Image: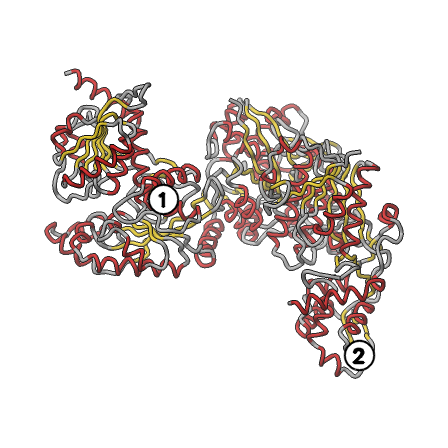
Amino acid sequence: MTKPRILVTGGTGFLGKRVLPLLREKFEVDVLSRSGKTEVQGDLCQWNAGLDLESLCSKNYSVFLHMAGLYDLMAAKVDCYQHNISAMGTALKVAEALQIPFFVNTSTVAAGINSSLGVVRPNDLNFAKPFPDAYSESKAHGEQVLHNWPMEHTTGRINLRLGVLVGDTKTGAIERIDGPYHAAEAFNKIRSLVESVPTSLPLPGSEKTRLPLVPVDKCAEAIVKFCEWAVQSKPQGYHSFHVTPNQGLSVRDLYTSALKSQAIPHKGVVLVDKISEALILKISSFIARFPEEELHYLMNFPIYDTTATREILGETWCPEFFQYEQKFWSGYEAYVSNR
Amino acid sequence: MKRTYRIAEISFGRPHWDAAYEFDFAGDHYEVQRFSANFSVETVKRLIGTLRNQVDAFALTSLPPVIKLDQKSYVHRQYLEIMATPSPVPLCDGTGLREIANINSLVKHIESGSIQPERGTFFPTAVLSTELEEYIRHRYRKSVYIGDAYSLLGLPWMIQPFPGLMTISKLALNVANIKDLKNNTPLAQSKLQKISRSSLAAQVEDVQYVFCDLPLLLLFDAATDFVRGKDLVIWSSHPAMEEEAKKYSPRSIINLFPENYRVHPYMNYSVLDAMLRLSHKRTAALSIEEWEQLITEDVEIRQVARKYVMTRNSSTQTKISQGINSVRNKIFKQPEPDFAFVIHALSHNDFMHVPGLGVLKHMPKEWNDSFDRMAAKAPPFVYGNIKHIISAESGKEINGIIYALPATPKVLKASDPEVIYRKIESICYDAANRGAKMIGLGAYTKIVGDQGVTINQNSPIPVTTGNSLSASATLWALADVVQRMHLLKQNPETGYVDGMAMVIGATGSIGKVSAKLLSMIFKKLCLVAPRLNRLEELRQEIQAMSPKCEVIITTDANELAPDADVLVTATSAFDQKIVDVMRLKPGAVVCDCSRPLDFDIEDAKKRPDVLIIESGEVVLPGPVEMNFEMGLPGKAVYACLAETALLTLEGQYEPFTMGRDIEWNKVKQIYRMARRHGVQLAAIQGHTGIITDKEIALTRDLALSRRKK
């Protein structure tokens, strides 16, 4: 039996590099990029992505996997909008023109950060409140574009809100410091201060928050499974999923683990969330240079509903933090020592 | 032939309703994709910058408003900023067209009874549709309700027109139009606003019509109680948006967008504007009269509508905003120059254009020379900038800086080359410090001394004389005119033109290349130059290149001038006539590339049957802006400047043309480069200005009758 054909964008990034080998086992893969080294050359910022749509039409793709985008909390608004909103429209236009029946998009949990629900549903978006940064705003608008884009041939649209990607479960290797790794960075910067605090250490965070950390290899497996699911189950309409762990990591556990891994002695951790968030962010960024944008999420991550995800991927698809804690920190150490 | 046009619709509003669609109109095919900027001017500029070489027009929608009140237009600061984005393709926003079409539809709806304004009309934001509001207010004064205070400021008041409303609105607009628009309008958040929302819904209970276009209505998010049970009047078509609006439970939706132009379910005035411009092959908007003819046949409606679209004065706010934008651009956004170019005063008269030196014309003529010599002592200065040169191929944008030497050719020729070198080298260093990667030498600065070689050796950035493109543009212009004259015939077998071409100054750099090119086209070629030995060398070279061409050499141009069909002169002779214009053949085409010119205006007047053109100037691609006087009409620039710009666009930073010789390969290479990046031949210039088709036809007729005699 011939393998179904898939068109992939964003195949050269941190996640894409891990998705491609797994994807090639199940699909005939064509990667669209502007790098000059992949099967299809194009650029989603150009008209029709700079593609010759007529000649590509004969390839009969079954799935369009759209992973390209800008994943950076600090990026400028104009870049975020261009790569996460306008490029999304162009990707959808291309999928429709090539008559690809299923469109799988990778978004982020940050898109749901504004939700007013206790447990965020995978398709919940709230535009009535300002977003904390241009990145989450652009991703949320990108999801809305995916939801509303008028299409005739692309009948199934699958949106995957990926959790916070961390190093894989085998080596823990990472390419840059972001998300939870900032905790270790910050502790190292104020090591002597932490050591000299005679009482429990007051740190920003809330007891209720759970961090949706996902090892990148597990995330890659999940994406491939969703692509397979699309081809087999032929879902129609719009479906959104949280690709996040069942439980997630509590902020206290992250801090304790980070302190332990950096061998910083301390007398316990107290989470502070009663004083104004703006003040906490300013103090943390001033004392420990913890980026305000990242800390906002640490303090505000809601609980994400993963019921639908577990139905497709199974209950145990994503390990919890303690199952890969060691690799997590060794990956960080490797990155830091090579820096 | 059916053409396909691409229109990028850029909405300033939310991206939720983006879509791509295609349709046919008047025999052409249109592809439209909507992009949204989510209230970010920078994003609109980025989108225009990325797509401008790939689309045929931009349709801008949901822009910050242009509000027309009391014969004045109040233009939002961000609107001005967006519309000032450089683009080689038109930016269409449908202003004017919207007013005509809306009034036309409204009158028809009122006549047919489908809209009865006396039953109450509510405008959530009247300032965004002043034409409709004003039309109804003048005729059904009591039935108009305005919700601007609520939707713009969150105040729970619904206003009915009162005597001082206009004054208050104008005052408010002066402030509001300077403030940036944001995504989160103060619509649904605070408790106060939630209360005012319900109070507003109660106030509009007796009103039957709500006038609000879809993109704005959907910004109200959930705060749309005022639509429930009403007839919603809109003026754009978008099925998905309409579907969403239906969730607010209006009784019905009435669309004012003209039916005959709803060629596709997704249509709005900006796309219509773009489509009409493209189908009429225009870059500027159609005139009000043309729009009227397309939209409405009713003369009375035209008169009514005209009141709302005629050009009005700019308000003080608009002028202030324009001022702020231009100052901001000057201070913060002065682009780094990518290339530099050196020019100099071409004659004494050029000094009179300098502000403050107008008095020179009262000076006795005999003082001119001494004044010129004195002026040449002044240091070179920055003369101006040339901005927004955009390649048609890659969309890359470059800017240039122009330096001027206050010296006339006469003075330059008389001065010590070393002095000139030093001056130009100082310009090169200054340009490099400003970020320029390439510098071009204009007019006589490239003839001084060893023609650029020394300057290039001492310059931190590569120098080019620009002669390669000058040569190819000249021959390009010549070919264009000769073809339009229809006097010469090509032999279909050999491919050669039956006629004689003459090159005066053939051993010079432009002359040599012209001679080589002409030898490939003409059966007979005559080379003229002062030194026979160099002429002989050139003849042998050309003979080897084009063995079928008969090459004659002479030192006296007048001897063979009566036989020449085409003449190219490229000399640097001062105050001496190289060829007598009276000896030229009737119908001859002369291309005068010499500086100073070999033929003057008197010569041209003496021989109306001979066509004398100056060397070919070109027009650079893109919406080029020049803030200096170069002595050429319109947007034309000297070909040598264009060569510098082209090399910069190509990223080929090298001393491309240098010294006396112009390489044949480079002439071909730069010509191809010019065509690729979208450089065009400027209107061809003669001594009395642009040579039109009519003049060419007249010259031809005159020549034919003289030849018969």
Q: Tag 2, which chain? A: A
Q: Can you tell which mark lies on residue A266?
A: 2
Q: Is residue A59 visible?
A: yes
Would you identify the image quadrant in which residue A129 lies? bottom right
The label shown at residue B579 is: none
Q: Which residue lies furthest to the top in this view?
A: B708
Q: Where is residue B173 in the image (x, y as percent from the top left)?
A: 55, 50
Q: Position of residue B24 (x, y in %)?
A: 59, 25
Q: Could you tell me which quadrant the C terminus of chain A lies in?
A: bottom right
Q: Is residue A253 above or below residue B411?
A: below
- Provide residue B486's location: percent of width, then percent of height: 29, 21
Q: Which residue lies furthest to the left in this view?
A: B366
Toward the viewer: B337 or A227?
A: A227
Few, some or many residues within 10 Å of mark 1 (<14, 14–19, 20+): many
Q: Where residue B411 sits: x, y (%)?
A: 17, 53
For the residue pair A113 and B468, the one nearer the viewer reads as: B468
Q: Name the residue under label 1.
A: B642
Amino acid tagged 1: Ala
The residue shown at (23%, 47%) is B346
Q: Is residue A325 toward the left or the right of residue B407 in the image?
A: right
Whether residue B249 is visible to the viewer of this picture, yes or no, is: no
Picture layout, residue B353 above or below residue A272:
above
Determine whether A158 is above or below B495 in the image: below
User: Is residue B152 found left or right of B642 in the rendered image?
Assistant: right
Query: Along the horizontal axis of the image, is B656 left or right of A270?
Result: left
Residue, x 71% and y 74% (percent of image)? A188
- Read off the chain for label 1: B
